Image (cartoon, rainbow, N blue to C red):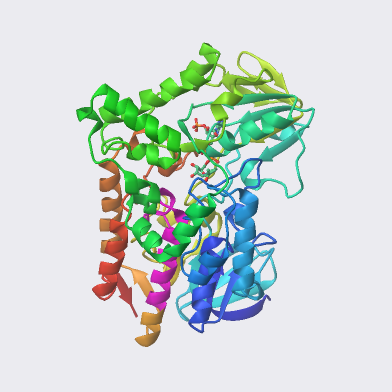
Amino acid sequence: MNRRKKFDAVVVGAGIAGLYMLHRLRECGLAVVVLERADGVGGTWYWNRYPGARCDVESLEYSYTFSEELQQEWSWSERYAGQPEILRYIEHVADRFDLEPHIEFNTEVESARFDEQESQWLVRTNGSVCYVSQFLIMATGCLSSANIPVIEGIESFKGNAYHTGKWPHEPVDFSGQSVGIVGTGSSAIQAIPHIADQCKSLTVFQRTPNYSIPARNGSLDLDYEARIKARYPQFRQRNRAMPAALGCFHAANNQSVLDATEPERRREFSKRWEIGGFGFLGAFNDLTLNLDANDIAAEYVRGRIRETVSDPRVAETLCPDSTIGCKRLCLDTEYFETYNLPHVDLVDLRTNPIERLTGSGIQCAKSQFEFDSIVFATGFDAMTGTLLRIDISGRQGTRLEQAWNEGPKTYLGLMTHGFPNIFFISGPGSPSVLTNMIISIEQHVEWIERCLSYMQSHSYTTVEAEEESQVAWVEHVNAIADKTLYPTCNSWYLGANIPGKPRVFMPHVGFPSYVEKCEHVVANGYEGFSFA
Ligand code: N01
């Protein structure tokens, strides 16, 4: 019989979301425990330690906003922070707010069952304790289940195999090695220049070419930092009002590219290419809404790739033909330049697909490759992967996997019908991955905290999303996605990267109007939720 520990709330995950949730609930005087499978805090930034791992949101924006003291005392060294610095920051936060004593590390949640009689969750882990609590809050991250591709013979490779999302904690030295890397998403685009720097030879296996914009990373300008810090709350407020909560869209141009002349287009795109970052997509107001407009931006980027990569055949293979911005836009430092190095090769899997892994490398349809190490930069079972790996059952024993077998169904991305008192931070159906994640996380954490306080003050025991409001929300999430170009490519937003995963557009395209909706729901007595 498992030993039982009782709490008001169990939070799963000690990343950016779980730590802030813990902090807020402790401030409210609740008994909270955080269960974390790793042996340290950090979540995404604990696991993704691959060479070159770096955030694509500027460091003065990608940080907590809830404490003015914290944001004043911390100094970032670069425009975009690297993984080691972000992890140090998260560790600092855990330390500063004395969070670690409330976290149980090396504790992986395996199942959670809602006990209807007692209105409480029973949470089981790889350990011997059963955690009992009124509330269960999933702070499990959107990109936390590594996608290991289904390739015949993958287990037979005798060299070193790595996944970017589960990178070893000891330094990996590729010196003198022949290395293969599978994938050309954001992780690969960051890792490739760094691995190429070290190894004897690097072969990149590309299935779909990707758009990438220069990050233009560099040391953080101290004057700029001082100016922001002098009015940090206003800076935050301004960014929260921007699409995706990203400050770069402050300078978005409200003109259609279709109305612009050729020199105007070039000027606007070039200006943003030189600045670097996501602001490129703000060059004109219709780039993510209209295919003809989008193709003008796409052609500009293809032109840049052709200018950069000296071998025209390689350049053509690297040129994407899909919608730009439909998958997460990549930001890079010298990614395309890396293909000019004599020891870097590109394999086009569209004409030479991988057939299997062998003991010594990769067998493609037309050629065979031998490697000391293979890096899988093959992404994640995003947004639902980690939630569905936990055996979660709600009312009448219904399993979350069953309830979501046609795709995730939530109300506001916060709760799902039939599963009382379980909240998802950045769940499917909320803007999460389409925003500066920390801003979305803070908004969810604060909403959940308010909801719990409301329940306390009204002596409610359970809260649950109503089915009708959930159906309407799922329709709304799809309807607004359909007004954009997001559904036009095979992205992980749609679950298209995982064989057999239902194709449903998972995030909500609509920050900051989403926040207004959440506020409206609260103002109307938590409209769409039922309490008992
Ligand atoms: O993963 P991805 P990621 N055979 O899914 C390929 C965030 N992030 O880890 O496109 C061959 O984007 C796959 O090919 P295809 C960011 O939100 C942020 O790079 O499916 N190839 C693709 O090329 C990002 O979007 C940062 O045809 C296979 C690649 O692997 C998200 O994380 C940094 C394959 C996977 O790309 C995920 O990025 C890193 C197979 N069987 C990540 N299976 C920053 O903040 C998959 N691929 C900068």
Q: Is residue 49 left or right of residue 500?
A: right
Residue 36 in sight here: no
Whether the magenta-drawn stretch holds residue 301 is answered as no
Residue 336 location (% of width, % of height): 54, 26
Query: Magenta stretch?
Result: 426-452
Quarter of the rendering occupied by the N terminus: bottom right
Q: Is residue 475 left or right of residue 205?
A: left
Question: In the figure, 442 relative to 370: above or below?
Answer: below
Q: Determine the residue positioned at 59% across, 20% down.
A: 347
Question: In the figure, 334 relative to 409: above or below?
Answer: above
**Which of the 4 quarters of the picture holds residue 183?**
top right
Q: Residue furthest front?
A: 223
Closer-to-camera residue (24/142) = 24
Quarter of the rendering occupied by the C terminus: bottom left
Residue 456 in sight here: yes
Closer-to-camera residue (175/219) = 219
Question: In the figure, 415 relative to 51: above or below?
Answer: below
